[in-house]
């Protein structure tokens, strides 16, 4: 089992969600987060004063899946979240030791 964590631009959320639904992803957790990567934020002008926005708004997606779905999901996220500009985001894939569905007590891939 794998946990796919993707950090994307907020306006791309609907495109990514639709792409994931099209390939049969049933569950996804979405969190509004802030962060920065290579772009190091940006400067804005407010009431004549310039200030630095260090952390940019992003969306973090978490998807728990079986090994067989990983490549399809990564491809769907990559294609639907890409703008070709800096700050498009990242995808992290980590191994899940165990998953337990609280309601039924199911474990492993059956709990996903």
Image (cartoon, rainbow, N blue to C red):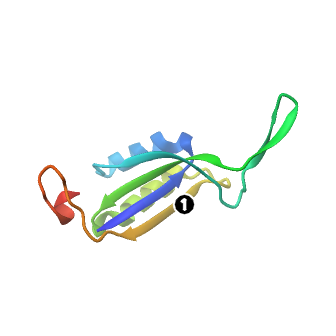
Q: Which residue is mark 1?
A: 90
Q: Nearer the viewer, residue 86 or 28?
A: 28
Q: Is residue 21 above or below residue 4?
A: above
Which residue sits at x=42%, y=67%? 93
The percent position of residue 12, horizontal first and vertical second, equals 52, 43
In the picture, the quarter occupied by the N terminus is bottom left
- On the image, the x and y values in percent for residue 14 come to 46, 40
Residue found at the very far top of the displayed protein: 47
**Residue found 11% across the figure and 52% down from its top:** 104
Q: Give the x, y percent position of residue 4.
A: 40, 61
Instruction: Give the percent coordinates (x, y) of residue 110.
Output: 16, 60
Q: Quadrant of residue 50?
A: top right
Tell me: 107 left or right of 48: left
Q: Is residue 27 left or right of 35 when viewed as pictured?
A: left
Pick the quarter of the image with the C terminus.
bottom left
Instruction: State which quadrant residue 37 falls in.
Output: bottom right
In the displayed orientation, state which residue is furthest to the right: 48
In the picture provided, is 21 more to the left or to the right than 43? left
Considering the numbered disc 1 on the image, is that residue within a helix, a strand or a loop? strand
């Amino acid at each position: 089992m794998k946990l796919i964590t993707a950090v994307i631009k907020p306006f791309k959320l609907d495109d990514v969600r639709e792409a994931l639904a099209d390939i049969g992803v049933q569950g996804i957790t979405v969190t509004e987060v802030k962060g920065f990567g290579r772009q190091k934020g940006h400067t804005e002008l407010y009431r004549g004063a310039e200030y630095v926005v260090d952390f940019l708004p992003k969306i973090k997606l978490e998807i728990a899946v079986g090994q067989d779905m990983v490549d399809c999901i990564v491809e769907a996220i990559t294609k639907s979240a890409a703008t070709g500009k800096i700050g498009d985001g990242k995808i992290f894939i980590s191994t899940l030791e165990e998953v337990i569905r609280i309601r039924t007590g199911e474990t492993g891939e059956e709990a996903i």
